[in-house]
Image (spheres, rainbow, N blue to C red):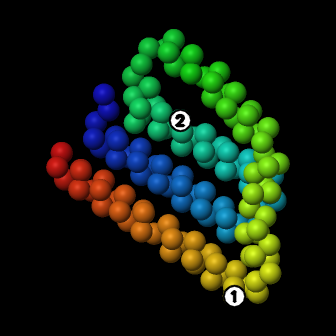
Amino acid sequence: MASDSKNVRIWLLLLALTAAEVALAYVKAPALTMLALLVALSVAKSGFIIGWFMHMKFEKRSLRLAIFPIVIVLILSMFAVLPDAHAQCSMCQRTAQAQDPAGVDRLNRAILALIAPPLTILTGIVLHLRGKM
């Protein structure tokens, strides 16, 4: 089983990967490039979550190998529905494009303001639980 310090390091790594995903929203990258990076970051995050917090790293190799094809099928399924995923956010995209640069900045700040409370609560819970250990 992993030590508490290792779990905290993995959690901080996951937090950094999430921050990188949020930062990608501010980079003016082509949609396909951004999507590829987001998928790669998501796969990495899910690997850490499954490996450490769901204890798959400590299971037998045969069980880990049995999970691998399922992950591949899920990733391929995600790419199969990719065209629909872009259409779902078209309203937000049109709203942002209709804004002037100051409006886009306000929209980005609002997104950050909406994510701050859950991250603060989650950080508080982790620190509180860490203090009890």
Q: Are marks 2 and 1 in contact (CB under 8 Å)?
A: no
- Which quadrant of the rendered structure holds the N terminus? top left
Expressed as whole percent of the image width and height from the top left, the position of residue 57 reads: 43, 26
Residue that appears at 45% across and 69% down = 116
Residue that appears at 42% across and 63% down = 118
Q: Amino acid at mark 1?
A: Ala
Secondary structure type for disc 1: helix
Where residue 88 sits, quadrant-wise, is: bottom right
Q: Which residue is mark 2?
A: 47
Where residue 30 sits, quadrant-wise, is: bottom right
Q: Which residue is mark 1?
A: 102
Relative vertical location of residue 42 with respect to residue 120 in this rendering, above or below: above
Residue furthest top in the image: 62
Q: Amino acid at mark 2?
A: Gly
In the image: residue 18, left or right of residue 118: right
In the image: residue 6, left or right of residue 119: left
Q: Earlier in the sequence, mark 2 or mark 1?
A: 2
